[in-house]
Image (cartoon, rainbow, N blue to C red):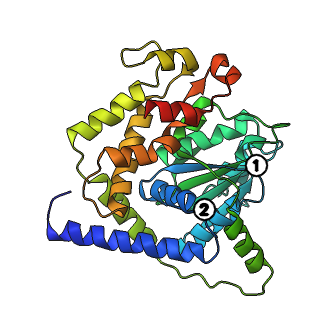
Amino acid sequence: MNDNKGDIQKAKEFVSAFNNFKKEISKVIVGQEDVVNQVLISIFSNGHCLLVGVPGLAKTLLVQTIADILGLKFNRIQFTPDLMPSDIIGTEILDESKNFKFIKGPLFANVVLADEINRTPPKTQAALLECMQERSVTSAGTKYVLDSPFFVLATQNPIEQEGTYPLPEAQLDRFMFNVILDYPKYEDELMIVKKSASNVKEDLKNIISANDIIMYQELVNSIPVNDNVLEYAVKLVSKTRPATIHANDYVNEYIEWGAGPRASQYIILAAKCNALINGKFSPDIEDVKAIAKPVLRHRIVKNYKAESKGLSIDDIIDNLL
């Protein structure tokens, strides 16, 4: 980011757009401030987001609300055990003139909600790998580029594990954030029930256009990062890898598998966005700490010792921080 008036003006506009965005979301979603922040940071950092929470915590509603406010093309895919890759990518059909024609599937949208992503077999989960990384889809040897911006926001239920297929590591690694939704506070739940018992339908304003999102993503990308912050982020990720130079005894004892280099890239990108929304023009170590958990929690695998002691992944990350 060049320190010129244009960039400073853009950064101010971004903060204002971000806050307006949150204000609009709060018309529909009560509380869940951290969750909303993290989902928006992943969108403005051009990343995908996995929302994990028990049923009824408004995961789907949050994604739909975001799509409505952005005024982008939105598709919801309900993942089920019988869903096939062609059901989400699209399929080749013979048209009247006996030529093969590609009918685009629901992946061809700006915002794709992958509802209960772990309910579908690995074959169908794998169909998302290319679109999440390359932002394109290949069918019958032809490559189709997806619209920009493009986000996959997936939901997962952590309790009912019967009939589910755990997401493979390669798939999990494609998600920038793993966001955990908790039960609402008592006051928030009162407000939710009051709202649902009334007939008032909230009118959502379209705050940001597709072009604005792309511009803000470029702005986030262009922010400079000091070497000490870069080193802190990379060292933090290196510390998660057992039996390596930066791993301490705690890591060697409780972690089976650590995070890869993509974690370091996402931490820096998310820290840049976190700095911007807080009115800073360069991230510091506090910004790295603020977003470390959602970036790392799905990239660390704990071992049986951690399981037997009842340690959660978040406990392990707290220790590393």
Q: Is residue 71 left or right of residue 279?
A: right
**Front in this rendered view, residue 112 or 266:** 266
Q: Residue at x 14, y 66 (%)?
A: 4
Q: Residue at x 64, y 37 (%)?
A: 126
Q: Amino acid at mark 1?
A: Phe
**Front in this rendered view, residue 101 or 152:** 152
Q: Marks 2 and 1: which is nearer the front?
A: 2
Identity of the residue furthest to the front in this view = 186
**Residue 124, x across and y down, in percent:** 71, 40
Vertical arrangement, residue 33 with respect to residue 311, above or below: below
Residue 79 circle label: 1
Mark 1 surroundings within 10 Å by alpha-carbon count, few (fewer than 14), some (14 through 19), many (20 or more): many
Q: Residue at x 47, y 60 (%)?
A: 149
**Residue 269, x across and y down, in percent:** 37, 47
Q: Where is mark 2, residue-wise?
A: 32
Q: Amino acid at mark 2?
A: Gln
**CB contact under 8 Å: marks 2 and 1:** no
Q: Is residue 211 visible?
A: no
Q: Secondary structure at mark 2?
A: loop
**Residue 101, x across and y down, in percent:** 65, 55
Q: Which quarter of the image is occupied by the N terminus?
A: bottom left
Q: Is residue 180 visible?
A: yes
Q: Is residue 283 left or right of residue 159?
A: left
Q: Secondary structure at mark 1?
A: loop
Q: Which quarter of the image is occupied by the C terminus?
A: top left
Q: Residue at x 39, y 63 (%)?
A: 214
